[in-house]
Image (spheres, rainbow, N blue to C red):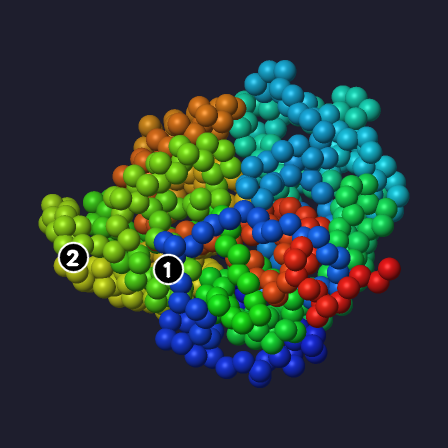
């Protein structure tokens, strides 16, 4: 499970973007970043892909919401770094736009028994320096990811042994069956590096001025820290040739991001912040595409204990105006939701998960009616109202402020008292990492996403011994079901267990879900091709970027032959 990346720094960008700052004003009552078109989240159509591109381009200017800290995702795994690097580096498995996964640098995978995974590797892959990918490179990369000091080490906790068992074969042996490991290989745990290049770069690998040591459709061309980052099509790429020759990345936060796209200083970007996406909706010359994501907004009760009683938590959930939050806090872009993971987590068994979600959504109304409020008041009366105010932790950002006020209003409607504690954004981040800081609040206005397209990538966070189980939820049945699901290799069987797990999580109101957050792709009119889903963090989206089949791209820079 991961925090959603939310840039907080001021604008860091090159001159072309800087010139765009004053060109667009801010207006609109529901979005402080400027007036986008009013949206209704319930009407948003989430589609994994955009129309296939056919026309070539020379250079595209792309926006990130912040500058990557590093392009070594083992040491600094940020969303900005992934958006760039997923076009440069490839993985053993590949996350698809529809959030399913398939073998990629691994040609196929077999399981001779439940605790053994045999990866048969492609023999036609070359790195950007011309060297062939070998099983030794793959094994070395996996062991690097598994190092306890690296970001992906937890993905290998169940691995007993990894070994080269043939010229193009790696065998992974597990302590017990591991249903999510191949999904992790579609993420950063599956990145394959050219060992000698990484070793030669040493501690400087992933920093400006160093090469990429990868095999993807693009190569890292340059990185001018504080200014721009450029990737260029690899002419020696072993796979299909991208339509666009070069992508120049710059970065801008909040209104600067909106203005750069609105004025044409940038050609596209993935709007990770819902407020930015809402501000760009309906802007002339731009098209927004909404895709499935695992991201969600949720209320997370803390160890302090003001919401220790699950009955009170269920009452709060019934009284919460999720539809009002979506409209006032996020321009209608987020969708009221009753689980802590978005629909992008349904990488398999989609009909089963969708049916279960509809049932849970019905029990957590988007806008509470009189019957829901009456039920909530009865729950409070039965449990006994807390004697102290419930403290709600937030920062001053628009979305969180709206959620915090909605929580206080919901508490008031059911006879309880809520107080809002607003802290600077930098201090807000400490709530996630410091129990001492959380001792000041009863509930946190939180945002999360998971990197795996499987709901079970989230629900282990409510295990009795999980450090993310702040409220101290304990259930032997829940723990047993979670462990059973994580050992179940059959997708259909695992989905049935997962649906039971999420029902128990909802019944106990371990967290109080608020909304799912879609992935948002913003493109200048005439451009198309990349996936709109959260797969853009792990899938080579730039390789599919180009012009629309029937569009006249004369206003766009064409590729130089």
* Label 2, residues with CA under 10 Å away: few <14, some 14-19, many ≥20: many
Counting residues from the start of the chain, the first of labels 1 and 2 encountered is: 1
Query: Quadrant of the rendered structure where residue 94 is?
Result: top right
Assign a secondary structure to mark 2.
loop
Is residue 392 in view?
Answer: no
Q: Residue at x 50, y 82 (%)?
A: 25
Q: Which residue is mark 2?
A: 414
Residue drawn at x 60%, y 73% as measured from the top left: 260
Quarter of the rendering containing residue 483: top left
Image label count: 2
Q: Position of residue 202 (x, y in %)?
A: 80, 50
Say whether residue 475 is visible.
yes
Q: Residue at x 32, y 41 (%)?
A: 358
- Comparing 319 with 139, the one in front is 319
- Residue sticking out furthest to the bottom: 22
Question: Percent x, y for residue 96?
Answer: 60, 41
Residue under pointer 1: 40
CA–CA distance in space, label 1 to label 2: 27 Å
How far from the left and from the top, in percent, is residue 494? 45, 27
């Amino acid at each position: 499970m991961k925090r959603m990346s939310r840039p907080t720094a001021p604008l860091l960008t090159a001159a072309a973007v800087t010139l765009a700052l004053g060109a667009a004003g801010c207006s609109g009552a529901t979005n402080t970043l400027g007036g986008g078109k009013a949206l209704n989240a319930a009407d948003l159509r989430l589609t994994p892909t955009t129309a296939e591109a056919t026309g070539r381009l020379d250079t595209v200017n792309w926006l990130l919401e912040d500058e990557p800290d590093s392009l070594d995702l083992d040491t600094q795994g940020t969303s900005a770094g992934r958006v760039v690097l997923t076009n440069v580096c490839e993985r053993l498995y590949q996350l698809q736009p529809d959030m399913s996964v398939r073998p990629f640098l691994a040609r196929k995978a077999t399981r001779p028994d439940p605790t053994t995974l045999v990866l048969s590797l492609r023999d036609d892959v070359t790195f950007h320096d011309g060297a062939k990918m070998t099983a030794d490179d793959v094994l070395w990369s996996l062991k690097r990811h598994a190092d306890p000091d690296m970001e992906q080490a937890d993905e290998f906790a169940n691995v007993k042994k990894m070994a080269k068992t043939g010229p193009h074969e790696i065998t992974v042996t597990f302590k017990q069956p591991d249903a999510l490991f191949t999904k992790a290989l579609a993420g950063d745990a599956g990145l394959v590096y050219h060992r000698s290049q990484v070793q030669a770069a040493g501690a400087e690998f992933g920093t400006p001025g160093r090469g990429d040591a990868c095999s993807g459709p693009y190569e890292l061309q340059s990185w001018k820290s504080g200014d721009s980052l450029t990737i260029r099509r690899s002419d020696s790429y072993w796979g299909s040739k991208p339509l666009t020759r070069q992508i120049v990345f710059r970065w801008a936060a909040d209104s600067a991001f909106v203005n750069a796209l609105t004025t044409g200083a940038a050609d596209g970007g993935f709007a990770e912040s819902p407020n930015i996406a809402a501000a760009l909706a309906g802007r002339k010359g731009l098209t927004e595409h909404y895709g499935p994501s695992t991201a969600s907004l949720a209320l997370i009760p803390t160890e302090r204990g003001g919401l220790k009683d699950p009955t009170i938590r269920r009452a709060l959930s019934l009284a919460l105006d999720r539809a009002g939050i979506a409209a006032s806090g996020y321009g209608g872009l987020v969708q009221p939701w009753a689980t802590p993971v978005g629909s992008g987590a349904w990488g398999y068994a989609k009909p089963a998960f969708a049916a279960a979600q509809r049932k849970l959504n019905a029990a957590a109304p988007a806008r509470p009616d009189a019957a829901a409020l009456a039920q909530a008041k009865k729950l409070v009366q039965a449990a006994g109202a807390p004697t102290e105010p419930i403290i709600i932790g937030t920062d001053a950002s628009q979305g969180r402020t709206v959620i915090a006020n909605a929580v206080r209003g919901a508490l008031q409607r059911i006879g309880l008292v809520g107080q809002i504690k607003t802290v600077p954004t930098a201090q807000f981040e400490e709530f996630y990492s410091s129990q001492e800081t959380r001792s000041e609040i009863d509930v946190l206005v939180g945002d999360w996403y998971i990197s795996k397209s499987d709901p079970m990538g989230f629900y282990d966070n409510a295990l009795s011994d999980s450090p993310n189980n702040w409220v101290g939820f304990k259930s032997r049945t829940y723990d047993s079901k979670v462990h059973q699901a994580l050992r179940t290799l059959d997708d259909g069987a695992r989905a049935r267990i997962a649906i039971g797990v999420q029902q128990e999580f909802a019944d106990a109101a371990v967290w109080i879900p608020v909304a799912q957050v879609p992935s948002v792709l913003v493109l200048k009119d005439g451009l198309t091709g990349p996936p709109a889903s959260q797969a853009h963090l792990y899938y080579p989206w730039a390789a599919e970027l180009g012009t629309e089949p029937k569009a006249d791209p004369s206003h766009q820079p064409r590729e130089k032959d």
